[in-house]
Amino acid sequence: MKKTIYILLCILAISCSKDSVQEIENNYPFDDSELELIDKINQHRVDISLPQLQILPHLGYLCSKNNQEMMRIGTICNCYLNESANSISRLYNTQHVSQIALVNYSTSQSAMNAIMNDATSKIIIERNYTDIGVAIIRDTNTNKKYYTILIIKR
């Protein structure tokens, strides 16, 4: 089974006016495998003397939108990155937004191994970021798992 990892780093220079975070849906229900991957990323950061990333449910929601689109088209993409980055920057006054998308990893550990073995992905999780969101979805027709990770710096 072919395994794929796709990374897109989007660094935004914010010049728009500050919007306050208003009532938005921040109730993304992270499941155990998503929390496990976040824990693995945070443990790696602690091991190299970086602060843990704070879980931001809105990022998980945006990741789930990307996963739904990847599943719909049947391939890996950063389909909503521009839209997500614009939304995130307006709501949270971000300095940087990065996204990692993966497909075909059966466990959070195998996904973490792929991240650590990819130089760009490893750089992303080792940067001076503040918040994280993760979504994982399994396509019941193909049995493929789709992963999207959004990491931001406020």
Image: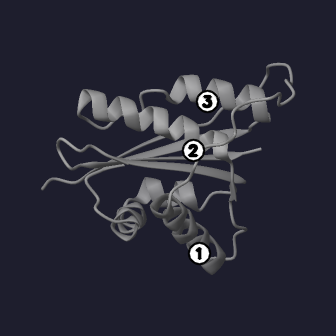
The tag on residue 85 is 3
Q: CA distance from mark 1 to mark 3?
A: 26 Å
x, y percent for residue 32: 49, 63
Circle 3 Cα neighbour tier, 10 Å, few/some/many (<14 / 14–19 / ≥20):
many
In this rendered view, identify the residue nearer to me: 105 or 99: 105
Q: Is residue 88 left or right of residue 120?
A: right
Quadrant location of residue 125?
bottom right
Q: Earlier in the sequence, mark 1 or mark 3?
A: 1
Mark closer to the observer (1, 2): 2
Instruction: For marks 2 and 3, give the CA distance.
Output: 13 Å
Residue 99: image tag:
none
Q: Amino acid at mark 1?
A: Gln
Percent position (x, y) of residue 112? 42, 66
Q: Quadrant of residue 17?
A: top right
Estimate the x, y position of residue 61 in percent, counting from the top left.
57, 38
Res 78 → quadrant: top left
Within 10 angstroms of label 1, few (less than 14), some, or many (20 or more) residues?
some
Tell me the SS state at disc 1.
helix
Residue sitting at x 62%, y 77%: 48
Q: Secondary structure at mark 2?
A: helix
Q: Residue at x 56, y 22 (%)?
A: 83
Query: Nearer the N terminus, badge 1 or badge 2?
Result: 1
Q: Residue at x 75, y 25 (%)?
A: 90
Which is more foreground, mark 2 or mark 3?
A: 2
Residue 9 in view, yes or no: no
The kind of residue tagged 3 is Ala
Q: For mark 2, what is the residue?
A: 60
Residue located beneath label 1 in the image: 43
